[in-house]
Structures are given as C-alpha cells and as structure tokens.
Amino acid sequence: MKRTVVMLTLAVAVGIALGMVGSQVLNAQQEPVTRTVLLKTDMEGKDANMYIATIAPGAATPKHYHPGHEFVYVLEGSGILEEEGKPPLTLKPGVFFYLRSSSEKAEYVHAAKNTSTTDPLKILVVLITEKGQPLAVPVK
C-alpha cells in the first residue's frame, strides 16, 4: 500500500514537471507578432500590401511607423494602440483607422498591445508605400 502511494505521488510529480516544461516550450515558440501576407502588388509605381498582423496574447509591438498610407481594421481580439502625442485607442473588432507617414520622416509613431492573456489580436492592414519601402520602420 505504501509503495503504491509513493509510486502514484512520483508519477503525479513527474507529470506536473513534464507539463510545465512542455508549456514553457510551446510559449517560447510563439512569436509575439506575425504577419500573414494576403496580397503584394505593384500599384502604378507604388507597392500595395495587404496582410493580417497577429499579436500574441499579452504581447506588444515595439514602437514603429509605416512609411506610407496605412489602413487598419481590427478583426479579432482586444488591445490598445498607443500613438505618440495622442491618448490610447481601444482596439476591438470593427475599429478602423488610418495613419500616414512619409519615408523620410517618422510620423505617426505607434505601438500596439494585446490586452488579452488568452486570445490573439488580429488586425487587417492595407499599406501603400513608395516602391521598395519596408512594411515597418522601428523607432527607438
């Protein structure tokens, strides 16, 4: 009887330890922000990109700007957009906004944060830039 209790206790302890390690490995593999490109095309000398940006639960983007015209629509989740010099904007499905920055000047510097600890924040972005510009430019 005593041996059975010891073996069960050991099995439970090993199971808990393996579960914790497995959970940490899965969480470590999840990227904080990903882009799924839906469309990339030439638009009379400009680049047009459509993508879904997914921000993992509890994650945030670093401060950045997009060198062009950015049209944004929130598909799923909840979060906040912090644009320099403006109050935070609450992000939830159906919210949309427009930002514009030139390729020479960091205008509309912002960061987004997923306020959920369980669900991703998914945002549809249409970005029109001068030919050859990056999708985002980090700001320190």
Image: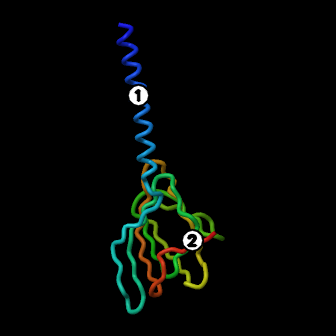
Quadrant of the frame with the C terminus: bottom right
In the rendered view, tell whether residue 111 sits above or below residue 39.
above
Q: Where is residue 92 in the image (x, y as percent from the top left)?
A: 46, 60
Determine which quarter of the picture holds residue 38.
bottom left
Of marks 2 and 1, the one in the foreground: 1
Determine which quarter of the picture holds residue 111.
bottom right
Residue at horizontal 45 percent and vertical 72 percent from the top: 72
Q: Which amino acid does label 1 sit on?
A: Val
Residue at horizontal 55 percent and vertical 81 percent from the top: 101
Residue at horizontal 51 percent and vertical 52 percent from the top: 58
- Secondary structure under tag 1 reads helix
Counting other residues with Cα less than 10 Å from the Cα at mark 2, is it few (<14), some (14-19), or many (20 or more)? some
Q: Name the residue under label 2.
A: 138
Q: Residue 2 carries which label?
A: none
Quadrant of the frame with the N terminus: top left
Q: Where is residue 102 in the image (x, y as percent from the top left)?
A: 56, 84
Which of the two labelled residues, at mark 2 and mark 1, occupies the earlier sequence position? 1
Direction right: furthest residue: 85
Label 2 to label 1, Cα distance in Å?
A: 44 Å
Q: Which of the two residues, 57 or 28, is positioned nearer the viewer here?
A: 28
Q: Which of the two residues, 25 or 82, is positioned nearer the viewer here?
A: 25
Q: Mark 1 points at which residue?
A: 14
